[in-house]
Image: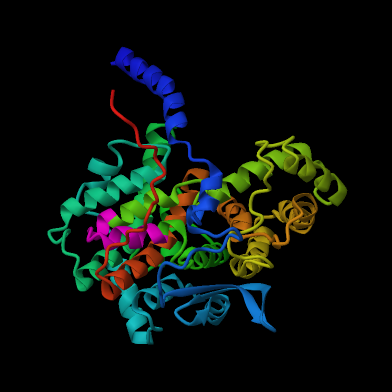
C-alpha cells in the first residue's frame, strides 16, 4: 500500500506541469469576453444572480447621483442587526429568537419564541450510539470534515431524508440547527482524546439552556461559565448567523438546493465551502498573525513599534510573507463592518473579566494603524477597516475555545442562514442554477 501511494504521489507531481500548461487561461481573455471572474466585477461588486428577503448588506449610498461609501449595515428580515442585539439587553440571550426570525421571516411572539426554544432544546440530541459509532470512529484535527461526515450520516437515520417538501425541509433544518453544537464539540473531544492523548469527557446538553450556554457547558470539564461569557458568545453567534445570499457557502446552499438535492447533502456542501481559509477560516489566520506580532513587538502601547512591524508584514518581509494584514478589509464593506462595531463593546467587557486588557490594547492599536498603512502602500480608493474576524478569534481565545473549533463555531451560527436560504430557494424557484462558461479551447485534429 505504501509503495502504491508513493507511486501515485510521484505520478501526481509529474502530472501537475501538464495540467498547468493545458488548463491555463490568459487573464486578458476574461476582459476580452467580459467575463466576471469570481462572479465579481472589476470593482469587486458581486454580479446580481438572485433575490432574497432574508438579509441585506449596505456599504454605500447614492448621493447627488453618485455612489458614496457609508458605514456598513447588516439587516436581518427588515431589522438592523444593531437594533436586534440592542433590544435583547445585557442579560437576554437571543440566538434562538433571531434564528426564528431568519427562518420564519417574522419576529416571534413570546409564546412562539418559548415554543421554538423548547423545540430546539428537545431536538438537541443525537441518535443512539451516534457519538460512539460515528463521531469517535475516525477522529480528525479537521473538525469541519468530521462534522460534514456526521451530517451526511444523519441522513441514514431519517426516514424522510429525500423528501424536499418545504415542511420536511423546515423540520430537517431545525434538527440540524439543534444538533450542530453537539457535532462540533464532540468531534473536538474525540480528536483531543484519540489524537492528542488528552482526557475524554462527553457532557450531555441541557435542553433548558441556550445554544451559547450549551457550547460552553459541553466544552469545559467543569461545565461552568459566567454570564458575560455566555452573552459574548451568544452575540458572536448572532452576528455570524447570516450575511446575505452572495457569500460563498450560502450561494453553495442555493445552488445545491436548486438541483433538487436533500437537506443533508445541501448543508454538507455548504460546510465544505465554509471550511475554506478564504471564507470561514479567516479568524484563525488573524490569530496566527497576532501570535507572530506578539513575538516581535515588545511594547503593545508603542504605536511606532507596532507600525514598523506591520509595515514589514505588508512588504512581505514578515509573518507568512503574503503582504496581508488579516482581519482588515472586506469584500463588501468599506468604511466599517457593522458586526465589528457591535461586537467591540462585548470584546471589551470580556477582556476586562479575563484580565486581557493588554492584549486588547495591541488589537486596538493595530485597528488604528493598519488601515492607514494599507491605504498608503496599496494606494487604494476603497476604504479599509477591521472586519468581524479581527476580533472573533480573540474572543474565542478568551473563552478557552481551541482553534480547531473556530470555523466549526462559525458553522454552528451560519447553519441558520443556510437553512433560511434553502427554504426561500425551495419556495421561490424551481429552476436549477446554471451559469454559463465560455469555452476557449483550441480545436485539434487527431493523428
Q: Please tell me in which quadrant of the rendered image residue 165 appears.
A: bottom left
Residue most toward the left?
A: 159
Relative horizontal placement of residue 182, taking residue 43 as reference (left or right):
left
Give left or right: position of 139 versus 78. Answer: left
* Rendered location of residue 202, percent (x, y): 35, 47
Name the spot of residue 275 as percent of width and height, x first.
Answer: 44, 48
Give the residue at x 41% y 51%: 273
x, y (%) of residue 331? 58, 59
Q: Residue at x 41, y 31 (%)?
A: 195
Q: Nearer the viewer, residue 437 or 76?
A: 437
Does residue 303 appear to the left or right of 344 in the view shown? Answer: right
Of 410 and 268, which appears nearest the observer? Answer: 268
Q: What's the magenta region?
A: 250-265
Would you place residue 142 above or below residue 244 in this image?
above
Q: Report the label total.
A: 0
* Residue for point 49% across, 54% down: 33
Q: Nearer the viewer, residue 93 or 370?
A: 370
Q: Nearer the viewer, residue 116 or 202?
A: 116
Amino acid at each position: 500500500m505504501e509503495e502504491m501511494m508513493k507511486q501515485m504521489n510521484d505520478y501526481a507531481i509529474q502530472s501537475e506541469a501538464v495540467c498547468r500548461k493545458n488548463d491555463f487561461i490568459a487573464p486578458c481573455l476574461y476582459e476580452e469576453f467580459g467575463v466576471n471572474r469570481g462572479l465579481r466585477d472589476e470593482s469587486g461588486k458581486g454580479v446580481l444572480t438572485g433575490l432574497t428577503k432574508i438579509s441585506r448588506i449596505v456599504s454605500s449610498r447614492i448621493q447627488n447621483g453618485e455612489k458614496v461609501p457609508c458605514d456598513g449595515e447588516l439587516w436581518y428580515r427588515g431589522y438592523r442587526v444593531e437594533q436586534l442585539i440592542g433590544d435583547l439587553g445585557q442579560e437576554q440571550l437571543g440566538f434562538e429568537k433571531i434564528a426564528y426570525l431568519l427562518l420564519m421571516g417574522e419576529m416571534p411572539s413570546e409564546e412562539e419564541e418559548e415554543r421554538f426554544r423548547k423545540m430546539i432544546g428537545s431536538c438537541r440530541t443525537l441518535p443512539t450510539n451516534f457519538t460512539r459509532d460515528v463521531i469517535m470512529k475516525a477522529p480528525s484535527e479537521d473538525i469541519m470534515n468530521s462534522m460534514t461526515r456526521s451530517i451526511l450520516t444523519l441522513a441514514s437515520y431519517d426516514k424522510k431524508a429525500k423528501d424536499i417538501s418545504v415542511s420536511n425541509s423546515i423540520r430537517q433544518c431545525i434538527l440540524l440547527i439543534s444538533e450542530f453544537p453537539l457535532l462540533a464539540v464532540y468531534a473536538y473531544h474525540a480528536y483531543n482524546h484519540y489524537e492528542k492523548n488528552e482526557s475524554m469527557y462527553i457532557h450531555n446538553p441541557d435542553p433548558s439552556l441556550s445554544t451559547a450556554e450549551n457550547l460552553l457547558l459541553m466544552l469545559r470539564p467543569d461545565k461552568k461559565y459566567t454570564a458575560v461569557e455566555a452573552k459574548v458568545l451568544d452575540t458572536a453567534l448572532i452576528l455570524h448567523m447570516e450575511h446575505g445570499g452572495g457569500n460563498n457557502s450560502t450561494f453553495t446552499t442555493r445552488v445545491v438546493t436548486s438541483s433538487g438535492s436533500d437537506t443533508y447533502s445541501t448543508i454538507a456542501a455548504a460546510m465544505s465551502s465554509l471550511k475554506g481559509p478564504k471564507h470561514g477560516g479567516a479568524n484563525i489566520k488573524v490569530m496566527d498573525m497576532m501570535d507572530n506580532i506578539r513575538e516581535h513587538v515588545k511594547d503593545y502601547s508603542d504605536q511606532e513599534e507596532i507600525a514598523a512591524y506591520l509595515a514589514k508584514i505588508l512588504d512581505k518581509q514578515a509573518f507568512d510573507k503574503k503582504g496581508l494584514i488579516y482581519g482588515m478589509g472586506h469584500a463588501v464593506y468599506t468604511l466599517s463592518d457593522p458586526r465589528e462595531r457591535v461586537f467591540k463593546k462585548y470584546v471589551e467587557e470580556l477582556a476586562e473579566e479575563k484580565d486581557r486588557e493588554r492584549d486588547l490594547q495591541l488589537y486596538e492599536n493595530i485597528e488604528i494603524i493598519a488601515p492607514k498603512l494599507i491605504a498608503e502602500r496599496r494606494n487604494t480608493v476603497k476604504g479599509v477597516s477591521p472586519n468581524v474576524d479581527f476580533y472573533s478569534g480573540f474572543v474565542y481565545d478568551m473563552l478557552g475555545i481551541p482553534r480547531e473549533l473556530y470555523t466549526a463555531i462559525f458553522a454552528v451560527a451560519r447553519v441558520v442562514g443556510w437553512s433560511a436560504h434553502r427554504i426561500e430557494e425551495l419556495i421561490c424557484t424551481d429552476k436549477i442554477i446554471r451559469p454559463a462558461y465560455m469555452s476557449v479551447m483550441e480545436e485539434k485534429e487527431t493523428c
